């Protein structure tokens, strides 16, 4: 592969290079990783998915850009494998790595048997058959990707800064896609490295937050937080860079509000349905007529997204859930 074809300078002052690291997923073929350079320093935002091809593409790109991997700083927007998957293969021991403390904590929890059991129970409560609930829960648990003790890992949160040359990039908390998702904002140019917070190729999935957390409300609040920054350009993690990011942020917020209205309508017309029945009744934007024909990973994402909507509507008092003797929750309208 011609590595130069995977590198594109997408901004000046600071100099920003886009490196497309191969990653085949539902709607994308690469992860957009970014190298920010100034004054002989470099900051790498995300690394891509774990594969021999991806490791070679990223390594060759860094070499071509003249990046000293040991001196460079590394930043992870979140811990999904297509963002953190090459840390152990590309980042040398002792290099400085900036990650969210919330994200690392949640990543550790989600890799435990206790979490797997709890997630299985969550799906069962929505009326999913035990075998399907177990499969869905396993799809939601990713394997350990790297050892933070091997690196000079620094935990950051909103308001902290990461410097590269003359520039101080501000950490912005953008939870929703994951509980600890982070973005980086450069205030002079007003550019934002947004990870999976806002995408064009797909509406980012929203995580099932632990305990009683409301992932959808966190995501909507994050959209407002980003809008209030009045950014000049969004550098996201999948698909081509586009100028119409303001419209996309508006669309994403409205998309979820419309979905909430749809779910409320389903519950109002059909009281005492299980979560699974409600989720299957949603008009998902997929090219399949039968639920069972939908690829299993996509089904898992839709199932999880549906539960996120139901949790939000229960939390804001729009619907109520009652658990019956079989442990399954049924939903009714409140107003």
Image: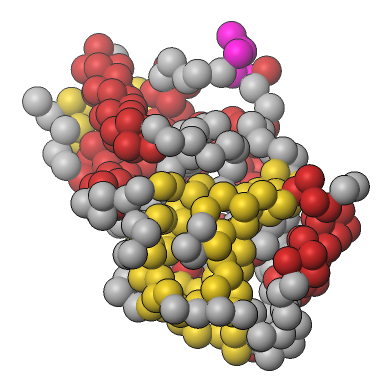
Residue at image point 35% right, 48% down: 232
- Could you tell me which residue is drawn at 45 percent across and 53 percent down? 194
Farthest residue, direction top: 289
- Please name the residue shown 68% across and 90% down the image: 94
Quarter that holds the C terminus: top left
What residue is shown at x 29% (from left), y 33% (from top)? Answer: 250
Q: Which residues are magenta?
A: 287-292
Colouring convention used in this rendered image of the protein: secondary structure
Q: For residue 70, which quarter of the picture?
A: bottom right
Answer whether residue 214 is visible to the viewer in this image.
Answer: no
Q: Is residue 289 magenta?
A: yes
Quadrant in which residue 64 is drawn: bottom right
Q: Nearer the viewer, residue 259 or 128?
A: 259
Q: Is residue 333 above or below residue 266?
A: below
Q: Position of residue 287 (x, y in %)?
A: 60, 13
Tell me if 16 is positioned left or right of 250 in this view. Answer: right
Main SS class of the magenta portion in the image: loop
Residues 36 and 133: in front is 36
Whole-percent x, y for residue 314 in the image: 23, 40
Judge by depth and name the residue closer to the eye, 313 or 61. 61
Above or below, comparing residue 30 to residue 298 in the picture: below
Can the viewer see residue 156?
A: yes
Percent x, y of residue 316: 16, 42
- Residue 79 image position (x, y, % from top left): 57, 63
161 falls in the magenta region: no
Number of numbered discs on residues: 0
Q: Please say if 111 is above or below 213.
A: below
Taking 265 as reference, is 101 above or below it? below
Depth check, front residue: 188 or 317: 188
Q: Please indicate whether residue 59 sits to the left or right of residue 166 in the image.
A: right
Instruction: Locate residue 187: give its quadrant.
Output: bottom left
């Amino acid at each position: 592969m011609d590595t130069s074809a995977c590198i594109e300078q997408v901004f000046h002052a600071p100099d920003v290079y886009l490196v497309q690291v191969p990653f085949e997923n539902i709607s994308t073929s690469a992860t957009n990783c970014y190298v920010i350079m100034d004054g002989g320093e470099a900051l790498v935002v995300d690394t891509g998915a774990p594969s021999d091809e991806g490791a070679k593409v990223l390594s060759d790109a860094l070499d071509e850009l003249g990046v000293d991997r040991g001196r460079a700083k590394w930043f992870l927007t979140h811990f999904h494998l297509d963002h953190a998957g090459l840390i152990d293969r590309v980042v040398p021991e002792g290099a400085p790595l900036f990650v969210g403390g919330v994200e690392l904590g949640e990543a550790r929890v989600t890799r435990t048997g206790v979490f797997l059991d709890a997630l299985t129970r969550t799906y069962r409560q929505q009326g999913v058959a035990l075998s399907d609930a177990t499969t869905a829960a396993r799809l939601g648990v990713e394997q350990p990707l790297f050892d933070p003790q091997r690196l000079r890992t620094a935990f950051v949160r909103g308001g902290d800064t990461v410097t590269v040359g003359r520039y101080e990039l501000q950490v912005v908390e953008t939870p929703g896609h994951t509980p600890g998702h982070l973005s980086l904002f450069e205030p002079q140019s007003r550019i934002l490295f947004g990870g999976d917070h806002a995408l064009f190729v797909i509406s980012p999935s929203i995580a099932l937050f632990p305990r009683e957390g409301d992932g959808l409300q966190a995501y909507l609040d994050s959209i407002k937080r980003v809008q209030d920054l009045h950014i000049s350009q969004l550098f996201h993690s999948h698909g081509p860079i586009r100028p119409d990011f303001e419209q996309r942020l508006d669309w994403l917020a409205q998309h979820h509000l419309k979905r909430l209205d749809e779910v409320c309508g389903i519950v109002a017309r059909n009281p005492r349905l299980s979560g699974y029945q409600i989720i299957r009744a949603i008009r998902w934007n997929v090219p399949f007529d039968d639920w069972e024909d939908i690829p299993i990973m996509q089904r898992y994402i839709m199932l999880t997204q549906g539960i996120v909507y139901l949790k939000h509507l229960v939390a804001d008092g729009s619907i109520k859930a009652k658990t019956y003797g079989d442990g399954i929750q049924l939903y009714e309208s409140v107003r």
